[in-house]
């Protein structure tokens, strides 16, 4: 197991580290002098880190490729308020040196329990056509295996093994609650949209060595892939209403909500609008949770800049929780205690105390 993970950068700023990483991307760029330098994106299960190698580059240019694993020695520093690694030395790792669990983050939740939660929700559908359709997807062994393992995104949210399932179960729970407040909303239609809205990620994303886009995913995107998948499964569901098919297709192509976010259509009926907002909310809440987890060791309640949300974040629980006083020394003698009390009573000034906080 690695001793240094990318999430440890805060504690190793301006220090030399040696650790193993997967190459998420590799670029060869020219310096102003015309000589080449390496611009890499490195990854491990805790995140990604930009890295540059300026010296002795010719010796290693052809020694590795994207998705290879490297052992790297370099300096952790900040550039424009973001951590980066200045590489001094590197070498490609052999297969026997690779511990794959170090590189791909995985949900901490129980996959079987998440899948069962999804199964129970679908079993509760009142609409037999929608229930049959979703069960047809879930009973496909290839789709089921991928749905249980795929990330929900490459970097922005739920970017870990099991992330798609984690995200969709969370969406089901939120949508189920919201439907109770809006009785005019068709619960089965909304939940079916939640199940389908990112299912194309199982083909859009590759997640064997690092998270990246497949060629098909890069060329088509998950929404086009989802329409193809939907068409194939609808052929197995007898007498599926064509109007219901149209609504499902709109749920898929409108769930990004805005044209500038890559949505071909804006949400045009209540279930489509709700799906967009609930999906966006769940994604942003997970992005915040993950950032707080990555930077849990920071003394300040403020995180670094979050690129997906476009702002630094305030960890409100850390902001509201006072620092705990150190525990008493059980070995202290009664005389020591009396001495401390006497010294305290001799103090000429009293420390002011804020309400709700211990001095």
Image (cartoon, rainbow, N blue to C red):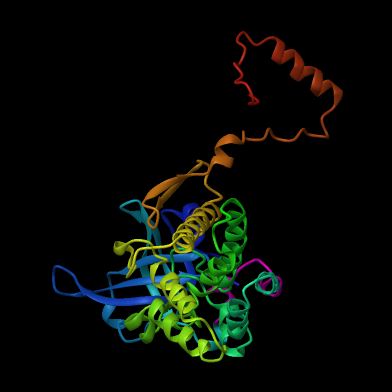
- Decide which of 314, 195 is in the foreground and name it: 195
Q: Position of residue 11 (x, y in %)?
A: 50, 52
Judge whether 241 appears above or below 17 on screen: below
Q: Position of residue 67 (x, y in %)?
A: 42, 82
Image position of 264 (left or right of 13): left
How many labels were placed on the picture?
0
- Decide which of 86, 232 is in the foreground and name it: 232
Q: Residue at x 56, y 50 (%)?
A: 296
Image position of 8 (left or right of 258): right
Q: Position of residue 126 (x, y in %)?
A: 65, 71
Judge whether 197 appears above or below 98 on screen: above
The reply to whether the magenta stretch includes residue 265 is no
Which image quadrant is residue 124 in?
Answer: bottom right
Q: Residue at x 44, y 63 (%)?
A: 156
- Decide which of 44, 78 is in the foreground and name it: 44
Give the residue at the far left of this rendering: 33
Image position of 177 (left or right of 21): right
Judge whether 344 appears above or below 53 on screen: above
Quarter occupied by the C terminus: top right
Residue 128 appears in the rendering: yes
Image position of 16 (left or right of 141): left
Quarter occupied by the N terminus: bottom right
Which image quadrant is residue 147 in?
Answer: bottom right
What's drawn in magenta, residue-wise? 98-115
Q: Position of residue 195 (x, y in %)?
A: 55, 72
The reply to whether the magenta stretch includes residue 111 is yes
Residue 145 appears in the rendering: no
């Amino acid at each position: 197991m690695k001793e240094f993970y990318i999430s440890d950068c805060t504690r190793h700023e301006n220090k030399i580290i040696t650790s193993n990483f997967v190459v998420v991307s590799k670029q060869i760029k020219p310096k102003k002098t015309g000589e080449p330098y390496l611009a890499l994106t490195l990854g491990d299960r805790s995140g990604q880190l930009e890295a540059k190698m300026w010296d002795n580059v010719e010796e290693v240019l052809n020694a590795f490729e994207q998705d290879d694993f490297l052992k790297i020695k370099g300096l952790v520093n900040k550039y424009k308020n973001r951590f980066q690694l200045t590489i001094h030395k590197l070498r490609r790792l052999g297969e026997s040196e690779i511990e794959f669990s170090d590189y791909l983050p995985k949900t901490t939740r129980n996959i079987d329990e998440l899948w069962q939660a999804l199964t129970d929700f679908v079993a509760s559908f009142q609409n037999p056509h929608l229930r049959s359709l979703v069960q047809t997807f879930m009973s496909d062994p290839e789709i089921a295996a991928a749905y249980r393992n795929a990330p929900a995104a490459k970097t922005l949210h739920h970017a870990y093994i099991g992330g798609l399932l984690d995200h969709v179960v969370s969406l089901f729970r939120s949508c189920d609650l919201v439907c109770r407040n809006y009785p005019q909303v068709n619960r089965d239609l909304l939940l079916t949209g939640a199940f389908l809205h990112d299912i194309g990620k199982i083909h859009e994303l590759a997640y064997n060595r690092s998270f990246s886009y497949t060629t098909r995913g890069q060329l088509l995107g998950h929404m086009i892939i989802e329409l193809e998948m939907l068409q194939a499964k609808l052929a197995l569901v007898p007498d599926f209403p064509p109007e219901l098919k149209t609504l499902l297709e709109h749920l898929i192509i409108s769930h990004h909500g805005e044209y500038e976010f890559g949505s071909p259509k804006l949400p045009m009926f209540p279930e489509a609008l709700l799906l967009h907002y609930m999906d966006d909310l769940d994604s942003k809440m997970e992005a915040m949770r993950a950032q707080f987890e990555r930077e849990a060791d920071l003394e300040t309640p403020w995180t670094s800049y979050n690129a997906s949300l476009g702002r630094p974040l305030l960890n409100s629980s850390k902001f509201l929780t006072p620092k705990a006083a150190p525990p008493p020394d059980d070995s202290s003698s009664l005389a020591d205690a009396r001495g401390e009390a006497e010294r305290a009573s001799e103090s000429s000034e009293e420390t002011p105390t804020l309400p709700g906080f211990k001095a």
